[in-house]
Image (cartoon, rainbow, N blue to C red):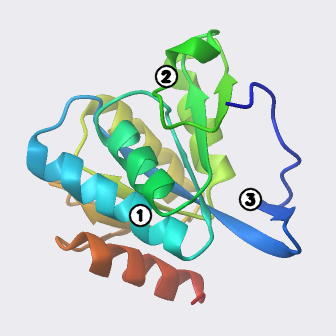
């Protein structure tokens, strides 16, 4: 695990002679098996495209998305609410401890070129508000029915829709 930040430019990372998009995966820290699996598939599908994921770095949806990304050989970034990098789930490659609690949600949104939301509660809702305000594309596998969120219940189709919104792959 890397415990320091990497050079980010316009929410992409230049490495391995290509530009890598950073996609946000947001959702609850406590989820049922179905949403855990959806988040794992989302992480896998993003990493298959050689892009990185950014999330809150903890458990539930965040852990599942990181796990899926690692299964596909991807890079995971966890923006942690605490000041301890050791709080990150075991699938986080780059842990960024902020000590900012929920205020770190704006960092997650600003880092991502687009986001996929899988379930979640109040913390996820705050991330969605920041994303909508910043006009970031958001695809939701969730119960959120808000303007600015494209609904999709299939995780593979959700990733495909986000990339279409981004005009990529």
User: Which numbered mark, 3 or 1, is in the foreground of this view?
Assistant: 1
Q: Quarter of the image holding residue 100? A: top right
Provide the residue designation for mark 3: 11
**Residue at the location (80% across, 73% down)?**
19
CA–CA distance in space, label 3 to label 1: 20 Å
Q: Earlier in the sequence, mark 1 or mark 2?
A: 1
x and y percentages locating residue 164 in the rendered image = 48, 88
Point out which mark residue 102 bears.
Answer: 2
Q: Quadrant of the C terminus?
A: bottom right
Q: Is residue 110 visible?
A: yes
x and y percentages locating residue 22 in the rendered image = 64, 60
Q: Is residue 109 above or below residue 97?
A: below
Taking depth in this image into account, of 149 and 95 the one nearest to the observer is 95
x and y percentages locating residue 84 in the rendered image = 62, 10
Considering the numbered disc 1 on the image, is that residue within a helix, a strand or a loop?
helix
Q: Is residue 152 above or below residue 1?
A: below
Q: How many marks?
A: 3
The reply, left or right, for residue 138 in relation to residue 145 is right
Considering the numbered disc 3 on the image, is that residue within a helix, a strand or a loop?
loop
**Residue at the location (81% across, 35% down)?**
5
User: 10 Å neighbourhood of mark 2: few (<14), some, or many (≥20)?
Assistant: some
**Residue at the location (42% across, 58% down)?**
43
Point out which mark residue 55 bears.
Answer: none
Taking depth in this image into account, of 87 and 80 the one nearest to the observer is 87
Provide the residue designation for mark 1: 44
């Amino acid at each position: 695990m890397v415990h320091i930040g990497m050079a980010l430019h316009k929410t992409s990372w230049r490495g391995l002679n290509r530009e890598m998009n950073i996609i946000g995966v947001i959702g609850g820290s406590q989820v049922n098996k179905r949403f855990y699996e959806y988040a794992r598939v989302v992480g896998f599908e993003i990493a298959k495209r050689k892009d990185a994921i950014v999330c809150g770095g903890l458990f539930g949806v965040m852990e599942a998305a990181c796990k899926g990304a690692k299964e596909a050989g991807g890079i995971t970034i966890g923006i942690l609410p605490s000041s301890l990098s050791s709080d990150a789930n075991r699938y986080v490659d780059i842990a960024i401890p902020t000590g900012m609690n929920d205020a770190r949600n704006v960092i997650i949104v600003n880092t991502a070129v687009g986001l996929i939301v899988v379930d979640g509660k109040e913390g996820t809702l705050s991330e969605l508000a920041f994303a909508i305000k910043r006009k970031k594309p958001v695809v939701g596998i969730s119960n959120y029915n808000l303007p600015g969120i494209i609904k999709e219940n299939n995780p593979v189709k959700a990733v495909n829709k986000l990339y279409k919104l981004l005009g990529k792959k």
